[in-house]
Image (cartoon, helix red, strand yellow):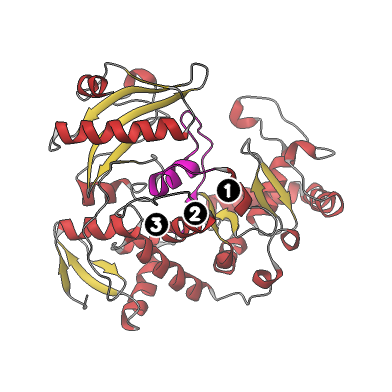
Amino acid sequence: MRRGGELSSAQARWLAVDAQGLGRPRPNGPVGRRHLRSAIEGAGLLQLDAINVLARTQFLVLFSRLGAYDVARLYDMSGPGGELFEYWGRMASLLPMARQPLFRWRMTEHGPYGSSPTYSVRRQAWQEAHAGYIASVLEEVRERGPLRASQLTDPRRRDGEWWERRSVGRQALEYLFTRGELAAWRTAGFERVYDLPERVIPEAVLSQPTPSVDEAHRQLLVLAARSLGVGTIGDLAGYYLIKQRSAKARVAELVEAGELVEVTVEGWRDAGYMLPNVGLRRPTRRNATLLSPFDSLIWERNRTWRLFGFDYRIEVYTPAPDRRYGYFVLPLLLGDRLVARLDLKADRKTSTLRVAGAFLESAADPEDVVAAAAIELDAMREWLQLRDLAVARRGNLAGPLRRAT
């Protein structure tokens, strides 16, 4: 598409859904490492989150794209010598190992919020107060090998409310991880294990030259455009948490170099940007797709509204009486539309996938949505190795869905 081209709102949705690997049918047959690799490459990163009421988001995002798969394969791809590394891509994320050099500028800045003046002052004061201890923690990892925070000889645990209980040892490990002086991966219990970068990241990656900040930003913005399909400067900047002022200058350079093209999108106030010569493909996936609240298709709420007319907020941290839809609500994608939202829970004690609430969007066809949702819920139930499916009475889609299942 040439500079100055125009996209309809439907075409923008097609680009977004296709770029995220959600527009094509899921693999027909066993899902292997190459499928996982392709899905993560398409999304660019896999956001991590500890909430496990259904399944952790990193597993749900891949299920959305690939269907049933063995989550052990994802663990095999991360950790020492793996092809994925963990860092602050957006939030805590798994990223393709080859892109580690593109985040070294962030390590220098002490993470995604390191340039904040308030954060910088507090971090500097904490670092100075604990300099000797931080050095001893790094030396202990060097001498003993991979360690969790609880395995430190002197973890310096703290008491208090849950948000104050993080031990000083954990803080020191996180500080070193954010600076790139340690690398990390996750256990099955979602606990970080820390080790020296040279024992985790392949030498072929560590030995690559560090790009300048501007060059790293340019490359990340191109990757963001590839994963978004089309996006505003704010969309592109937000994908890897690059400041908008810097992103604006780098996007202008990329347009000038022909690596991005500027387009007008129906209904968007700001210009859109996309890779050149990208074909427009209407989604061909016939089944519906449940999306994690932290899925990269929908994690930016303003963009989700702009693309789909879907007002979405995570209510996990909202007091129960104030929730509109529920605790862990997954939007349902059908074609290029978000047609419903389902509040789900994996009740492992009773081996039941529970639908605590089911809500149909006003413009969606209830008959089509019910049939598609029932199939997707059954596929998720089977993947989670749950025996039963139970639909509660809450929501305007609950009755028809209960009868269909």
Q: Residue at x 56, y 64 (%)?
A: 103
Q: Give the CA distance from mark 1 to mark 2.
A: 8 Å
Q: Quadrant of the N terminus?
A: bottom left
Q: Nearer the viewer, residue 290 or 293?
A: 290
| Label 1 neighbour load within 10 Å: few <14, some 14-19, many 20+ | few
In this view, the residue in front, 2 or 302, is: 2
Q: Are marks 1 and 2 in contact (CB under 8 Å)?
A: yes
Amino acid at circle 1: Arg
Could you tell which of marks 3 and 2 lies nearer the N-terminus? 2
Q: Quadrant of residue 99?
A: bottom right
Q: Which residue is mark 2?
A: 36
Determine contact: label 3, label 2, CB under 8 Å: no
Q: Judge from the rendering whether residue 350 lies leftward or rightward of residue 108; answer left or right.
A: left
- Residue interval drawn in magenta: 44-70
* Location of residue 50 in the rendering, given as x and y in whole percent from the top left corner: 54, 36
Residue 205 rendering spot, x and y as whole percentages: 64, 70
Q: Which residue is mark 3?
A: 238
Badge number at residue 258: none
Q: Which residue is mark 1?
A: 73
Residue 88 % position (x, y): 54, 54
